[in-house]
Image: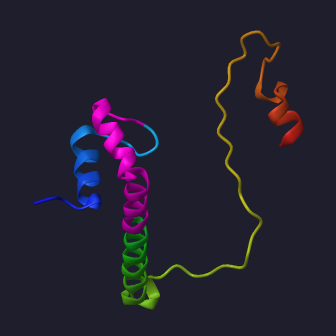
Amino acid sequence: AASSPDDWCASTAVSHAVRAGNSWGSLPAAGQKEWAWRRCDVIVRRTARHVEQNSMANYTAQLRAAVHAREPSRRLAKRAPSPPVFAVCVSSTSRGTGARSLDDLALFSVML
């Protein structure tokens, strides 16, 4: 029996480690042509988006139920709004610069 395009694309993506729009994995040239003919990039992305949306909806519902099931005395109290807190992570090299400290870098001395 012939498989549906969705089934073929899904099984091919798994068996050849294809990442839609990113990597052919181990899929040979003939399979790549069939992948394009069947429009598998569109099918696989649509399926992934659907799974993601359903998962997020389930997670939200479970979280909401868990919070409402908790005794009010065990819930975190809401506070008045406070100024936002920002965290900055920087990876840099000082090679070729005269920087001796973070304050010597424009990111910290000018932008922050």
Picture quadrant where residue 60 is located: bottom left
Seen in the picture, residue 91 relative to 71 is either above or below; the reply is above
Residue 6 picture location, percent across and down? 29, 60
Tell me which residue sits at (32%, 44%) in the image. 34
Closer-to-camera residue (58/89): 58
Seen in the picture, residue 96 relative to 62 is either above or below; the reply is above
Residue 97 is covered by the magenta coloring: no
Q: Quadrant of the N terminus?
A: bottom left
- Name, please, the residue furthest toward the left: 1
Residue 76 picture location, percent across and down? 52, 79
Question: Which stretch did the figure color magenta?
Answer: 23-51
Residue 7 picture location, percent across and down? 23, 58
* Circle count: 0
Q: Main secondary structure of the magenta part?
A: helix
Residue 20 picture location, percent across and down? 41, 46
Picture quadrant where residue 108 is located: top right
Picture quadrant where residue 30 is located: top left
Residue 40 is covered by the magenta coloring: yes
Q: Quadrant of the C terminus?
A: top right
- Name, please, the residue furthest toward the top: 96
Answer left or right for 18 relative to 94: left
Seen in the picture, residue 20 relative to 74 is either above or below; the reply is above
Tell me which residue sits at (43%, 70%) in the image. 53
